[in-house]
Image: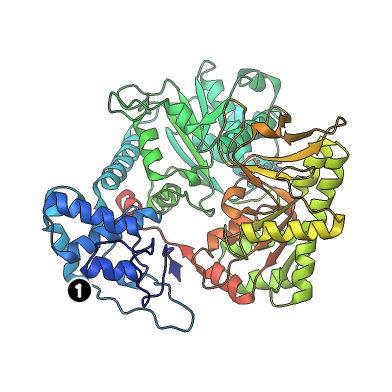
Amino acid sequence: MTTTPTGPTRPASADDRYDRQLALGAAGLLAEFNRAGVLGVADVHVARRLGAATGETDEEVLLALALTVRAVRLGSTCLDLTTAAELPVEHAEGEEPPTLRWPDADTWTDRVASSPLAAAAVVRIDQALVYLDRYWREERQVCEDLLARLSAPAAPTPDLEPTAAEIFPDAGYDEQRAAALSSARRRTTVLTGGPGTGKTTTVAGVLALLAELDPDARIALAAPTGKASARLQESVERELGRLPERHRARLRDLRATTLHRLLGSMQPRTGSRFTHDRHRPLPFEVVVVDEASMVPLTMMARLLEALRPETRLVLVGDPGQLSPVEAGAVLTDLVDGFAGRADSPVTSLLETHRFQGSIAALEAALRADDADAVLHLLTTGDGVELVDPGDADALAAFGQVSADAAYSVTLAAEAGDGPAAVAALDAHRLLCGHRTGPWGVSGWNRRVERLLADRTGVTHYEEWYAGRPVLVLANDPGLGLYNGDTGVTVRRPDGRLRVVVPGAGGAQELATTRLSDVQTLYAMTVHKSQGSQAADVSVVLPPPESPLLTHELLYTAVTRAQHHVRVLGTEDAVRAAVARRVQRASGLARRLG
Ligand SMILES: Nc1ncnc2c1ncn2[C@@H]1O[C@H](COP(=O)(O)OP(=O)(O)OP(=O)(O)O)[C@@H](O)[C@H]1O
């Protein structure tokens, strides 16, 4: 089973001209698909506007355009019209799905190909897929740049084996030693591996090998988000600390940054997107990009065009994790597209070094798509649990774990002990698949707040109180805060409240008035938790019919846990998640293969 999230949905029968989900003025097929909840208002408006600009009147062609806009909005880079009618259409429980007049799948693509829209290059047909022009260009460019990098002969490298043996001395590092050696010999590497498989350790080794080849090599470390770059900095520093002094000394001044900052500010007047592009390439001999699974197609296109052909590129990530919010799942496409090619730049690390026992077994069962094994482990394993939401006592106990964790944070925060409050906060995480609704972050935030109030006897009516955990929602480079940072409010001896936010350079304390874009963090989305870890994790699965319930969601959620994970969900929900891979349409893998 595969799924594509279906976006806004409403019952087909309702018709309200003031409904914000309905596109006013739309008629024919566009109105029909909008009313059924398949198309959003923006999809319809874009299609109508581009149709008017190009003189396109064929409603089936306009429908194809609107569906392609929708596909991009939901993360695909293109749309296959021959299978479009298989899109799951949400409908109210107990009702039949709406009957939609899907155009003839055999001729639809040809009609689009010979339309004024295609003549005006608004849409492109390639490999029988429909693209918006921009994504077609970016996908082709990514493919061409990568293949050009692979076909260029690599510079001859001296014998690196002795240095590799020095960096990775014992047999426990065999897999990483081999991966680091092959990366150091190549111009392009895609280093993949699940959580804790030693990707960062390998990157530190690759950098040490490359610095051995060229001690003056300029090295850039980057990640898609500020939070991920801060984590990269921290973990590379930690892993470099393991290396002999000679290597450490060479790599001491490395600083990680975001991809946006690496590429430079936007250049609106020159029409170029970033300071660095094909004409003004990045001045580095080595560029390492971590959390590559979070890099969307557009950013990958901008990065590749800004690299000199001789710059070594190392993309690092876990293709099993959630894809970026924007269009494209490039890392997955690279792994699929290069599979079986003799010149594949993909190197995979398989052995996990962080997890043990049932969590390691659960991770392996998920990777193998083995739903029976996943359920068996969740119901019998040590340190892993499945909690039935239909069992009131079990549900109450599940909520109590979060309330107890919040209580520990409150005690430390009221005592003014910042480090203890941060440690208590990081000891447990409650993760939800949904943002809103009773099973989402907003519902669980309220629920834990109530349980905590029952326990302390104090209900907080003020926004800020000692023990309030917060999640930062926007980057603020001035304050050194990043979207995804977490902090906790503590009471200082003078009674004032301060927010303690741990970071790579140590914790900082901020007045509550300086933090504007934050939300209470008794629960957070699985998406936001990517890349972070907690000793104990509670996961609230969406119901089986939710399109957000996917393999990637469950895998990302359970692999956040170091020692204990409890999953609130039915057996059906677990089976649905294991079976349902996020399907993002893209032509990149086929182009590469
Ligand atoms: N070969 C090894 N033997 C023992 N421990 C290792 C080995 N490789 C890495 N480790 C340790 O395992 C932990 C995970 O390694 P590392 O951070 O490199 O993995 P990762 O794949 O980058 O993890 P993630 O991306 O999930 O954060 C670290 O504490 C690291 O020091």
Q: In which quarter of the image is ligand 1?
A: top right
524 up-or-down from 415: above or below: below
Locate the N terminus by quadrant.
bottom left
Residue 106: x and y in percent read 19, 71
310 up-or-down from 341: above or below: above
Residue 117: x and y in percent read 15, 53
Depth order, front residue of 437/487: 437
Judge whether residue 215 can be spotted in this image.
Answer: yes
232 up-or-down from 73: above or below: above
Q: Is 544 left or right of 132, judged from the image as shown?
A: right
Q: Quadrant of residue 160?
A: top right
Depth order, front residue of 593/267: 267
Q: Which element is circle 1 on?
A: loop
Classify mark 1: residues with Cα within 10 Å, few (<14), some (14-19) or many (20+): few
Q: Is mark 1 within 8 Å of ligand 1?
A: no
| Residue name at image x 48 percent, y 35 percent | 314
Dot 1 amino acid type: Asp
Q: Is 462 left or right of 473, judged from the image as shown?
A: right
Judge whether residue 343 can be spotted in this image.
Answer: no
| Residue name at image x 42 percent, y 50 percent | 329
- According to the picture, the residue beneath numbered tag 1 turns out to be 104
Q: Is 452 left or right of 187, judged from the image as shown?
A: right
Depth order, front residue of 232/312: 232
Q: Is 246 left or right of 43, judged from the image as shown?
A: right
| Residue name at image x 40 percent, y 75 percent | 11
Q: In which quarter of the image is residue 252?
A: top right
Residue 447: x and y in percent read 71, 61
